[in-house]
Image: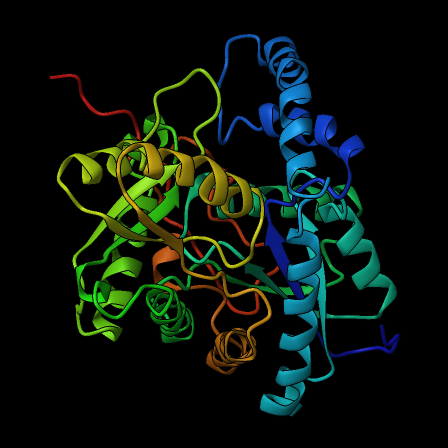
Amino acid sequence: MVHSSGGTGIVMLNLGGPRGLDDVGPFLERLFEDREIIQLPAQGVLGPFIARRRTPKLRRTYESIGGASPLYHWTSEQGRGMAERLDRLSPETAPHRSYLAFRYTDPLTGEALRQMAADGVERAVAFSQYPQFSCSTTGSSLHELWRQVRHLGLESAFTWSVIDRWGSHPAFTGTVARKVAEGLQQFDEAVRDDVVVLFSAHSLPLRIINRGDAYLQEVAASVHEVMRHLDFSHEYALSFQADVGPVAWQGPSTASVIRALGRQGRRHVLIVGIVFTTDHLDTLHEIDHEFAEIAAEAGVTGFRRAPAPNDDPLFLDGLAEVVAAHLRSGEPCSRQFGLRCAGCTSTSCREIVRPVTSHRPAPVTTPADPR
């Protein structure tokens, strides 16, 4: 990494994933401590207990895909490729450097901030790697970012803006459409028109959805835009995967939809990870192994997965285009970012520390009149 003053730091916010089997326990503990995803009674006690109970099984699962999540590798590659392209697209804001800020595994947010300060960066962009906004993902990562900024005494070190959502941006939906087209090529031409395209998104607790979280509508918008790129060439559906913890989750579950398609006599299914920009456990194990087995049992004889974007050069072009357009706009965030969920009670939600221009989120609403 180049060490020089000035330039623009792009902080890539993401979930993270264990880089080795010894990271699995701490990963789960941090996940179950995050009340923006899971709220448990006596969470300080029950959260670590659940994490310890789940660790052995999850370790075995990671062993089945090589002992580590590839998310760190792919996000690093995406950051490098994006920064190189940004130097050409936006020379006035160069040099550009990418910094990984993971929520539950190393490199954690504080490490990214310390490195950015050491590099002399002054202009910073918090770039959520969750294309569709949710308080539980992008929101949680941003809250941690501002907590660490204050903890490290860096409130005046950087001028910030936020790329909080980009799930309908052609750079994303166009890439996914190309990946769907690649996936369809895996089917024999004689059956290709009969393939059902099943978009699968990471589920969220219903408590978050019912509070007014934007995730559900934004995922649906991404699906619509991808199919529009494809001229709605195939039948398609949306389902949800990867629910964890003793709470109610958004459905229908991907497993249940696969079984239903089998009962309906559909024999060819292409599954698309509509919220995943890299391969990780949800694609390499849950889709490629668990859902493939369910499909075989359900009579779905042709079950394939569209490739994840990973380091596809066209996707890296798209990441750079998203950031370049954001920098040109001079705006601190999307217009939608300032609108809180209907049931929001957090006084720090939608905050930006030292924004590039004025940013005023909507005020916290009072509880509704029970009448």
The residue at the point 76 percent across, 48 percent down is 107
Question: From this viewpoint, is residue 292 visible?
Answer: yes
Find residue 281 and report its horizontal and vertical position in percent: 57, 42
| Above or below, comparing residue 11 to residue 211 in the picture | below
Q: Quadrant of residue 108?
A: top right
Which of 151 and 260 lies nearest the eye of the viewer? 260
Dividing the picture into quadrants, the one containing residue 98 is bottom right
Q: Is residue 261 above or below residue 24?
A: below
| Quadrant location, the N terminus | bottom right
Q: Residue at point 18% right, 65% down? A: 193
The percent position of residue 69, horizontal first and vertical second, equals 67, 45
Q: In this view of the protein, can residue 272 be seen by the observer?
A: no
Image spot of residue 163 (x, y percent)? 50, 63
Residue 203 placement: quadrant: top left
Viewport quadrant of the C terminus? top left
Residue 268 locus on image (x, y percent): 26, 52
- Residue at 78% x, 78% y is 6
Report the number of discs: 0
Q: Is residue 81 left or right of residue 241?
A: right
> Residue 153 vs residue 31: left or right?
right
Is 222 placed above or below 153 here? Answer: below
